[in-house]
């Protein structure tokens, strides 16, 4: 048996290896060659798998980056980790510049609390969030984005947020346009109905129900011949109306057939010039075959004397503070004004919100004492204020009458709010505040009430004596249950919100 040496210290003996026979060496060579072939096959398989993974990664990267929907990945602290091209175009910023940027920097100041609460709820519970948020873009545009967020894990196992943004600004603008059209439709004194080209009635306005005595549910879905006694057949009327305007006298098919009206029917065409609908205008009842003559009502006398001075006040500015002696009467000409008092804890509590036409600092005018509240314009809205000297206000009977009415109204509102602060939960207080605002400046749209909401969530919380988080939570819960919905800056409330008898409000 031979002994082999390896490199090392001179004279050191190494382990002896037995000398292999020729047959054993050949077997070993064959085994090594087979093992080499197996390793090469495994290497080829791994290379093909790596190439497939690279192709798949590139495909999904392109699918993410080139998708028409705006995708973002946000960290737990709200910073942008990844963003696709559609989201970069939506935000108006280069894709490379968005990496690491705080997303809340694009969120409008009024919606910061709402965005923060949804993000915190997502990371705490893992429940997906969907909400509407307004974004302020670098070019000055205001964008309304429907946001859907879901929880996920990043590459290092850290929690991240997957967000999808959809621009709904046009949709909100269309909703506002439709709401304005509905208000204009219901404010006219002429009855208006819409029907398809076969004469089937699809919709009527409020004036139509008042003029004919029908309810909307009684006529919608019926044919014109079932509602009116027509001088021609429906087919003749339809053919004449589709070619040009048709006008004639009709009577309703009710028990009182003596109520005759003048009806004018016109065709409605689409962009291709095809007739799609008929629109009919119903004038008030005719008497003695003559059209009714409109009686012009006298204009109301101005509530502010000519001696008043009007000044423009920027948003968020203080007009006078608690304890000041202004020495004059104020009236809101345009915009909004809030009256607030400082609590013992240093927080501002809003005691009232004033709309155009409202007077304030009435108490100082009557008793000569310093003002008991601070008056300022709202955070995001400027205003125009009429300044009226005290003696002029006291000598004007119209102003004195308006002051008496407003004092009684404010006493009622403040008594309701004081009772609510002591006994009501936050949601009930929010409902009460919406009811008060609806009384002051609300409008009807069918069974719903449109309440203008100039206040931020923080200011609404100051009005009802609650934190901004509690107020946002209450509004979000009401919105999820379908009781309220936002349309621009207006809050559309269902009848349940404003007429809940549990509030015990007359």
Image (cartoon, rainbow, N blue to C red):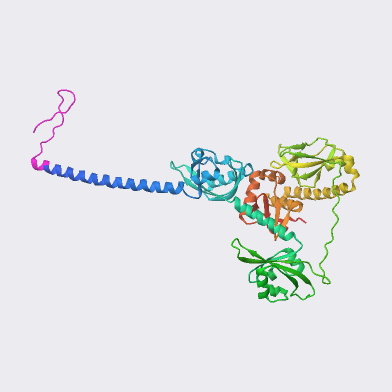
Residue that lies at the very extreme toward the top in this rendered image: 10
- Residue 471, percent from left and from top: 66, 47
Q: Is residue 108 above or below residue 484?
A: above
Outermost residue, right direction? 395
Q: Residue at x 63, y 71 (%)?
A: 198
**As displayed, is residue 443 above or below residue 193?**
above
Residue nearest the viewer, comparing 39 with 335: 335
Magenta segment boundaries in residue numbering? 1-25
Quarter of the figure that contains the C terminus: bottom right
Q: Is residue 2 magenta?
A: yes
Above or below, 397 against 241 in this view is above
Q: Which quadrant would residue 368 be assigned to in this image?
A: top right
Within the magenta stretch, is there residue 358?
no
Q: Position of residue 380 (x, y in %)?
A: 69, 42
- Quadrant in the picture for residue 376: top right
Which residue is at 47% across, 49% downward? 67
């Amino acid at each position: 048996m031979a002994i082999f040496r390896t490199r090392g210290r001179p004279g050191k003996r190494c382990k002896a290896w037995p000398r292999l026979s020729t047959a054993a060496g050949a077997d070993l060579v064959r085994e090594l060659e087979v093992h080499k072939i197996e390793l090469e096959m495994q290497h080829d398989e791994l290379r093909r798998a790596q190439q497939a993974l690279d192709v798949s990664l590139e495909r999904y990267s392109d699918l993410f980056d080139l998708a028409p929907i705006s995708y973002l990945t946000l960290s737990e602290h709200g910073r942008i980790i990844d963003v696709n091209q559609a989201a970069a175009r939506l935000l108006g910023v280069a894709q490379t510049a968005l990496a690491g940027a705080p997303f809340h920097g694009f969120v409008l100041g009024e919606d910061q609390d709402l965005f923060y609460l949804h993000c915190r709820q997502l990371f705490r519970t893992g429940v997906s969030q969907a909400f509407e948020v307004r974004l302020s873009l670098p070019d000055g545009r205001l964008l309304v984005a429907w946001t859907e967020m879901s929880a996920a894990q990043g590459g290092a196992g850290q929690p991240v947020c997957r967000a999808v943004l959809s621009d709904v600004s046009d949709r909100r603008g269309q909703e506002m346009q439709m709401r304005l059209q509905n208000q204009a439709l219901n404010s006219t004194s002429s009855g208006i109905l819409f029907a398809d080209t076969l004469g089937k009635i699809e919709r009527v306005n409020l004036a139509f129900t008042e003029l004919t005595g029908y309810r909307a549910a009684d006529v919608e879905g019926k044919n014109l011949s079932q509602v009116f006694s027509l001088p021609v057949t429906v087919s003749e009327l339809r053919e004449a109306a589709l070619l040009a305007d048709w006008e004639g006298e009709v009577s309703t098919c009710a028990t009182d057939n003596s109520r005759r009206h003048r009806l004018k029917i016109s065709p409605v065409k689409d962009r291709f010039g095809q007739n799609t609908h008929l629109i009919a205008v119903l004038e008030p009842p005719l008497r003695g075959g003559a059209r009714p003559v409109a009686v012009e009502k006298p204009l109301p006398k101005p509530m502010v004397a000519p001696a008043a001075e009007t000044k423009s006040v920027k948003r968020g500015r203080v007009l006078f503070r608690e304890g000041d002696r202004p020495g004059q009467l104020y009236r809101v000409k345009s915009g909004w004004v809030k009256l607030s008092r400082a609590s013992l804890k240093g927080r501002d509590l809003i005691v009232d919100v004033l709309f155009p036409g409202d007077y304030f600092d009435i108490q100082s005018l009557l008793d000569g004492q310093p003002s008991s509240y601070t008056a300022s314009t709202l955070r995001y809205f400027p205003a125009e204020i009429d300044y009226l000297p005290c003696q002029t206000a006291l000598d004007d009977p119209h102003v004195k009458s308006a002051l008496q009415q407003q004092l009684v109204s404010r006493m009622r509102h403040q008594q309701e709010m004081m009772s609510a602060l002591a006994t009501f939960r936050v949601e009930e207080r929010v409902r009460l505040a919406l009811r008060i605002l609806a009384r002051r400046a609300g409008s009807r749209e069918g069974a719903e009430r449109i309440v203008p909401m100039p206040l931020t969530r923080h200011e609404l919380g100051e009005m009802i004596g609650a934190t901004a988080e509690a107020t946002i939570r209450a509004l979000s819960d009401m919105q999820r249950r379908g009781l309220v919905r936002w349309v621009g800056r207006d809050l559309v409330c269902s009848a349940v919100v404003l007429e809940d008898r549990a509030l015990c409000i007359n």
